Amino acid sequence: MNAHIIRLYGYPTSPFVLKPGCYLKYKQLPFEFIPVNPVTREQIRFSKQRKVPVLSIDGEWKCDSSPIGIWLDERFPEKPLLGSNDSEKEAILAIDHWISAQLLPARFRAALHWENAWDAIRNGWLLASAMNNAIPISWYLRVTWPLLVKRAGFLHKIVNKLDLEESLWDMHERLADELTGHLAGGPFLGGLSAPSLADLSAYPIIIFPHLMGLHGRSTYLERREIVDWCRQVQAHLPDNPLLVPDDYLKRPVFL
């Protein structure tokens, strides 16, 4: 079988990019990760896109995490991401929509609405360090990264779709309940017996702060059901499920 040239373009700390990274790792498809400069975005100029991720396969490309997952299943049906029938596919895509509309924006909300300013600043510096390791950015960007993220217009656009009258921690508690409910008694989301696009979309959002040693409470990892689910998903991924070098993992992957 001829080898395919697969390249994933994006920021190593972006949850949008971590999702297709997990899809590719789950499917055991070798790929090259191409870090994108957050200022010039010159690496994705060929796509005429301003947002990441972008995935290219043998010269063809697609953007946006969920469509990338669907495309990967079409191109490489082994180890499917969308279940084994139409009913499972519908359930998986419904949960993935919830992840995109609720779980992922809630993570961004913590970076915009600081509960603890010192934790938020330290976390921003850790993320800036990981970015700089992937593609050099100026010292000024590294130092001011927490404030730049806090003021990022596209993040406010995402977060403002949430019910901001609900406190941040009440929101995380509710989402932890909903994530547990989506397990539906099965080892994987939707009650399925194998990981799907939904699991591989939610997992990096939950596990990234833990593995990177970010400061602050993790409501999700206080739930035994969610920790058990994390272990089940991680068993289908390499030891480092992220897009940063191993030495950036500050905590063990198995909780």
Image: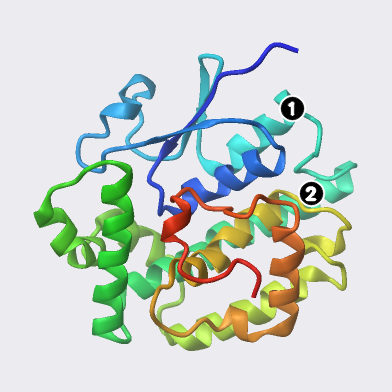
Classify 10 Å Cα crowding around label 1: few (below 14), some (14-19), many (20 and above): few
Quarter where residue 4 is shown: top right
Picture coordinates of residue 185, whole percent (x, y): 87, 73
Q: Nearer the viewer, residue 4 or 174?
A: 4
Amino acid marked by disc 1: Phe
Picture coordinates of residue 155, whole percent (x, y): 33, 59
Picture coordinates of residue 242, whole percent (x, y): 52, 52
Residue in the image at 19% along x and 46% along y: 137
Identify the mark nearer the N-term, 1 or 2: 1
Q: Nearer the viewer, residue 59 or 165?
A: 59
The C terminus lies in quadrant: bottom right
Secondary structure under badge 2?
A: helix
- Residue 166 can be seen in this image: no
**Which residue sits furthest left?**
140
Quarter where residue 250 is shown: bottom left
What residue is disc 2 on? 90
- Residue 97 can be seen in this image: yes
Amino acid marked by disc 2: Glu
Residue in the image at 84% along x and 53% along y: 194
154 in relation to 102, above or below: above
What residue is disc 1 on? 76
